[in-house]
Amino acid sequence: MRGVGARPRDCLAVLTGVALCGVSGSALAQGLPNPPTPKPNPTVVREGPVHVPPDASGIDLSEIDSNDLELLYFDPAQTYLTPYIGRAFTNALQFHKKKFNWTPWDRTTVLLKDFGDYGNAAARGSPNNAVLLDVAPLSQTMETFSPGERFFTLTNHELAHVATMDVWNSRDASWRKFLHGKPMPLQEHPESILWNYLATPRTNVPRWYLEGSAVFFETWMAGGLGRAQGGFDEMVWRARVRDNDRFFSPLGLESEGIAVDYQVGVNDYLYGTRFFSYLALTYGPEKAVDWLRRPEDSKAFYAARFREVFGKRLDEVWDDWIRFENKQHDYPQRIEYRREGEGLVAEIGGPGAPGKEEVITYRYSRCPAG
């Protein structure tokens, strides 16, 4: 990477100068007589101020560039973070490129900011690949989030979003070239929704699809440390089964489920993560990841791609997952210890083949002294 020094602090210098001049001018005015009031010149025509659009170059940001990354940060407060974030980004990018069979369409812009008390992040895939990172510590209240080191976890999660939305094949590439990029849908131009779908079809997906896949990867890349195997998610689903709570369908989740949860959009995380975990457990992680890919001749729409990979409709497998969550399918349902001679035998048993119990046996014996 090559570093680019901080741009001149024009904005800060102007604000400081205005503040200092205001103070010194007020003090000076106390010791001088009032100047005479100038007489207006009737021959001079004064015009109103000319509107000038805001100029982003006035923001005092430093920049580090590489072939894959444009890292923007505030120097010197965040400079110490940049080497580690650069490495975390590179490692996550290489992992996702391999798993998604993906070549990023453009360089990813990462902006570090520190405007809140708790860490957070966001990502997008159109009109460009970008990630926003809050540098504050992540909230772990009630253990709703079980992360590893925060930037390691956030870059793994957010780059999964970028990969999921940016994946492309030759057909998508043709549209991106024709449209001169990846158009972003605008409310003022409804036709932009079509252009956005043609160029980046996988940005037009429900949020549970994006968050579920990202949390799945976040947990996988941390060796199992993450929300997909966290205690809070397990507690939520066991409680819902115990209380015979209603489970939303994919459509019901996006129309009602996200509006009735007790946190902002948390149901998308809970449902999406649990569904992806079910897919990996039942069909294997390779198939779960293959659903996210965009190979040649693959279906662009996420639900059509699901049927292409799994051979079943999305709603059908979703119902299979809800039935699987029933406590009758919990494993193990039986834990037994018994003594055999000088040894100890432990058995766990639960649902296996149809109508049969699957039993795993563990045998323990005394260790020799010394």
Image (spheres, helix red, strand yellow):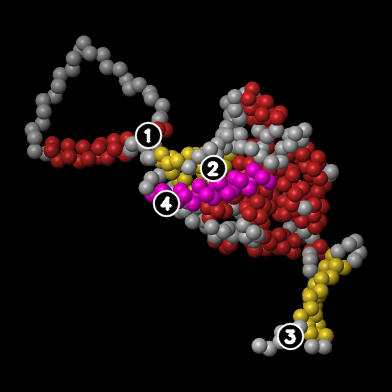
Query: For the residue carrying disc 1, how many other residues have a C-alpha within 10 Å: few (<14), some (14-19), or many (20+)?
Result: few
The Cα–Cα distance between marks 4 and 1, rounded to whole angstroms, is: 23 Å
Secondary structure mostly seen in the magenta stretch = helix
Nearer mark to the viewer, of 3 and 2: 3
Magenta span contains residue 88: yes
Q: Which residue is mark 2?
A: 131
In this rendering, the answer to whether 301 lies above or below 146 is above
Q: Quick one: SS at disc 4?
A: helix
Q: Secondary structure at mark 3?
A: loop
Q: Which residues are magenta?
A: 77-99
Q: Earlier in the sequence, mark 2 or mark 1?
A: 1
- Residue at point 68% right, 62% down? 234
| Residue 357 in picture, x, y percent from top left | 87, 68
What residue lies at 38% left-to-right and 49% top-to-bottom?
Answer: 77
Give the alpha-carbon distance from disc 2 to disc 1, as whole Å.
Answer: 21 Å
Disc marking residue 87: none
Residue bearing the label numbered 4: 80
Which of the marked residues, 4 or 3, is nearer the chain's N terminus?
Answer: 4
Label 1: which secondary element = helix
Q: CA distance from mark 4 to mark 2?
A: 19 Å
Q: Which residue is mark 3?
A: 366
